[in-house]
Image (spheres, rainbow, N blue to C red):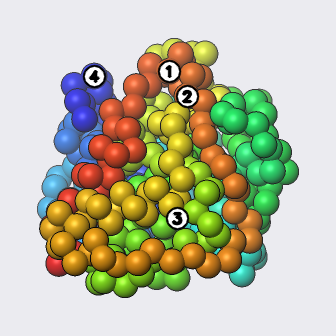
Amino acid sequence: MNLEQFKVLEGKRVLVTGGAGFIGSNLCEALLSLNAKVTCLDNFATGHRHNIAPFLEQDNFTLIEGDIRNLETCQQACKGIDFVLHQAALGSVPRSIEDPITSNEVNVNGFLNMLVAARDQEVKRFIYAASSSTYGDSENLPKVEEVIGKPLSPYAITKYVNELYADNFKRTYDLDTIGLRYFNVFGRRQDPNGAYAAVIPKFVIQLMNHESPVINGDGAYSRDFTYIDNVVQMNLLAISTSNEKALNEVYNTAVGDRTTIKSMAEEVRTFLSAYDPKIAEVEIKHGPNRRGDIPHSLASIEKAKNNLNYQPTHIFKEGLKEATDWYWENLQ
């Protein structure tokens, strides 16, 4: 990704919450390459120290180990900060169904703490990770930002509440915000392990181990799989935009194309087979549908193109090729 257009961020003080996570660590890396001054706030509940290990010796990088459920920690982290990239959350629809209380504490209470701290410390702009799960039971395709349905999981509710709070903090306290509705983000550093691992890294690690991945349902459900570089670009655009009309809005952060789960699994198998021909023989299996899953996900990215000059750099197959290469090189 060409970062030249973001040189205006040099010397800016940016807080990345959840900065040791998959998306957060990629944001930290991009910001550091632009000579921004980066503070990472993480409690390592789902993030990993190895994701930020290369940054710890850099003068422009500061780690605060703490929890967004603690307001004092949030206040400390926001002190002297220009921009917040709020990525910290408990992701996963199944996790929220099994434990809605903790998901709410982190994703709603923690989010509110961060908004309050950003307001109190006079942060210039608050960019936050919203979610395509907010579209809920809306059957409209492609998904446009102004048309949503009823949430299908506690996780989706928490993410919608974030949008409501962000809008209210602009109206009430004049805190500028931008919400980015992520659509099935994947790529380097995404954790393939654990009960709530995302589907692409989970399938990658299973196939590398010659284990059969199991698709929920018949595989006809489709997703707008979005490579990490596109997500980094959207965050940097949200920080650096001088378009006043772009502020205090939510944007789909996606590619604007969709792939079935079955096709995705087959593509992963094909790419990995180039490294290990035996992987081509591994069977892809099917299980029951999963509660809370949206059948189809396809984003309109016109609003992001028009207001933020967003142009995705990676379509699905290009991103998947880079991701599988990264996993093969780093997880052997």
How packed mark 2 is, by other alpha carbons closer than 10 Å (few <14, some 14-19, many 20 or more), is many
Question: Who's the residue at 70% across and 36% down the image?
Answer: 141
Q: CA distance from mark 4 to mark 2?
A: 20 Å
Q: Nearer the viewer, residue 279 or 324?
A: 279
- In the rendered image, is residue 102 in sight? no
Residue 81 screen position, x and y as percent: 43, 43
Q: Residues within 10 Å of mark 1 (few under 14, many from 20)?
A: few
Q: Residue at x 17, y 53 (%)?
A: 59
Q: Secondary structure at mark 1?
A: helix
Q: CA distance from mark 2 to mark 1?
A: 6 Å
Residue 234 is at least partly visible in this image: yes
Q: Amino acid at mark 1?
A: Lys
Reading the image, the residue beneath label 4 is 5
Report the residue marked by disc 1: 305
Q: Amino acid at mark 4?
A: Gln
The residue labelled by disc 2 is 301
Q: CA distance from mark 4 to mark 3?
A: 33 Å
Q: Quadrant of the N terminus?
A: top left
Tell me which label, 3 or 2, sits earlier in the chain: 3
Residue closest to the eye, 23 or 6: 23
Does 30 appear above or below 277?
above
Upstream in sequence: badge 1 or badge 4: 4
Which residue position is annotated with label 3?
73
* Nearer to the camera, 158 or 92: 92
Amino acid at dot 2: Ile
> Which percent across, then down, holds residue 331?
22, 75
**Gap between marks 3 and 2 measured at Cα:** 35 Å
Q: Amino acid at mark 3?
A: Thr
- The quadrant the C terminus occupies is bottom left
Q: Residue at x 52, y 34 (%)?
A: 256
Give the alpha-carbon distance from disc 1 to disc 4, as whole Å.
15 Å
Front tag of 1 and 4: 1
